[in-house]
């Protein structure tokens, strides 16, 4: 009998990494894919990105609205509670054999708690990582402790899970599944992107993604001001800003980016959600990625694109030679962007091994999900280091 695997996704960010995993599960003869879509996917403020999932050919088995509310910590806490409550109902209806979640979002913590209380084993992707300035760090490690299977993006992260007491037999180093699409995606060219986005793509082209830093909520206004002040120095540059996530403090960032883009609508635009095709197509022609998103550390360097990583949001994550860490100050950001768009900087970093692998993670994950004895992982023991 086919094993039922329920993948739960809450945002464009985790779906970008999960899509190849979902495709591999769907194609596996021994697995049946189920999908629960929640969180930002269902909110018009974040682009109703559930449509992207259907556009890629997946069937959505349940849409679970958790009531994201405004951008305060209280709203996030209430949404987390709603996630536990409402996702539980869908899991009871679907009766999956195993649940797959990715990363460190609060709605995903709710999904993991629901599965745990229903005694459904959890497989967690991208565990063992560190983002020291965000509540995501605590969420990620909390999910690790309720998960039974772990799929890590790099060897140091697998080592960290062993430190946390996870059984080495259940830790699988597969690389980052978000890189699976790099060699197979039919990308848009520059002219197609210009028509699609409605801007003139001049040089340099900058792709900017900046999210709240949840453990430093009072710094959001200062950070986005420093970023836009630095970007003001590149008057002839084309700039594509991707939408902000739903973490507390997102409104001030979103408003600042939209106001900045409105100053030059011929060369600047804000897009709530680019989707896989447009985002990776942009990366293939961009001069630099700027902001504090994990995509600047994972996807961009794998394509050979320099990243200016601003502030502490990604502090603790592995980074390759094409990543420039910058303080969240105008002068530092300006200097870092100038360094990133210098052709000699890119040339020196291209060809070096990226820390997150080169694709193929989705197939590896599906194989483990099909072959692992669920009875062997149901009772979890704490693994003590020698």
Image: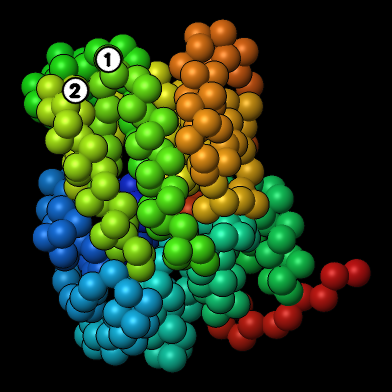
Residue lying at 32% horizontally and 74% vertically, measured from the top left: 72
Quadrant into which the C terminus falls:
bottom right
- In this picture, is 286 found above or below 333? above
Q: Mark 1 points at which residue?
A: 236
Mark 2 closeness class: few <14, some 14–19, many ≥20 residues within 10 Å: many
In-front residue for pair 379/110: 110
Task: Inspect this view and state whether residue 83 appears.
Answer: no
Q: In this view, does 351 lie above or below 321?
A: above
In the rendered image, residue 321, in percent from the top left (x then y), is placed at 63, 27
- Is there CB contact under 8 Å for labels 1 and 2? yes
Residue 194 vertical placement versus 203 (above, below): below
Q: What residue occupies the far right of the structure in this picture?
A: 386
Identify which residue, 130 or 149, lies in the foreground. 130
| Disc 2 element | loop
**Which residue is at 45% across, 65% downward?**
217
Pointer 1 or 2: first along the chain: 1
Give the quadrant of residue 45. bottom left
Residue at 29 percent across and 69 percent down: it is: 71
User: Mark 1: which secondary structure?
Assistant: loop
Q: Where is residue 270 in the image (x, y as percent from the top left)?
A: 20, 39
Q: Give the colour scheme of this rendering.
A: rainbow
Q: Is residue 264 visible?
A: yes
* Residue 157, x across and y down, in percent: 66, 54
Marks 1/2: CA–CA distance: 8 Å
Q: Give the left or right position of residue 192, taking residue 134 as reference.
A: left
Residue beneath label 2, please?
267
All told, the count of numbered labels is 2
Quarter of the image where the N terminus is located: bottom left
The reply, left or right, for residue 173 in relation to residue 80 is right
């Amino acid at each position: 009998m086919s094993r039922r695997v329920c993948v739960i996704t809450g945002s464009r960010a985790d779906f970008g990494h999960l899509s190849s995993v979902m495709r591999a599960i769907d194609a596996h003869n021994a697995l049946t894919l189920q999908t629960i879509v929640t969180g930002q996917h269902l909110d018009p403020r974040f682009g109703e990105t559930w449509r992207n999932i259907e556009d890629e050919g997946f069937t959505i088995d349940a849409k679970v609205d958790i009531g994201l509310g405004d951008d305060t910590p209280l709203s996030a806490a209430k949404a987390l509670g709603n996630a536990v409550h409402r996702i539980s109902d869908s899991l009871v209806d679907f009766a999956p054999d195993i649940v797959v979640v990715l990363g460190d979002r609060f709605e995903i913590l709710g999904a993991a708690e629901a599965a745990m209380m229903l005694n459904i084993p959890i497989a967690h992707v991208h565990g063992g990582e560190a983002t020291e300035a965000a509540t995501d760090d605590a969420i990620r490690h909390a999910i690790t402790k309720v998960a039974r299977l772990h799929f890590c993006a790099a060897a140091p992260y697998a080592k960290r899970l062993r430190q946390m007491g996870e059984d080495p037999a259940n830790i699988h180093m597969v690389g980052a599944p978000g890189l699976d699409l790099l060699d197979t995606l039919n990308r848009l060219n520059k002219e197609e992107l210009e028509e699609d986005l409605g801007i003139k793509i001049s040089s340099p082209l900058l792709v900017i993604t900046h999210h709240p830093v949840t453990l430093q909520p009072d710094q959001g206004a200062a950070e986005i001001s420093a970023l836009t002040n630095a970007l003001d120095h590149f008057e002839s540059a084309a700039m594509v800003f991707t939408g902000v996530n739903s973490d507390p403090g997102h409104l001030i960032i979103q408003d600042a980016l939209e106001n900045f883009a409105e100053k030059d609508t011929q060369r600047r635009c804000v897009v709530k959600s680019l989707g896989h095709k447009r985002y990776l197509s942009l990366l293939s022609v961009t001069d630099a990625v700027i902001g504090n998103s994990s995509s600047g550390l994972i996807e961009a360097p794998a394509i050979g694109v320099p990243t200016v990583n601003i502030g502490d949001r990604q502090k603790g994550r592995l980074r390759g030679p094409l990543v420039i860490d910058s303080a969240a100050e105008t002068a530092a950001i300006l200097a870092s962007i100038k360094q990133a768009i210098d052709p000699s900087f890119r040339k020196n970093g291209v060809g070096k091994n990226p820390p997150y692998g080169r694709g193929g993670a989705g197939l590896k994950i599906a194989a483990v999900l099909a072959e692992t004895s669920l009875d062997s992982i149901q009772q979890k023991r704490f693994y003590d280091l020698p």
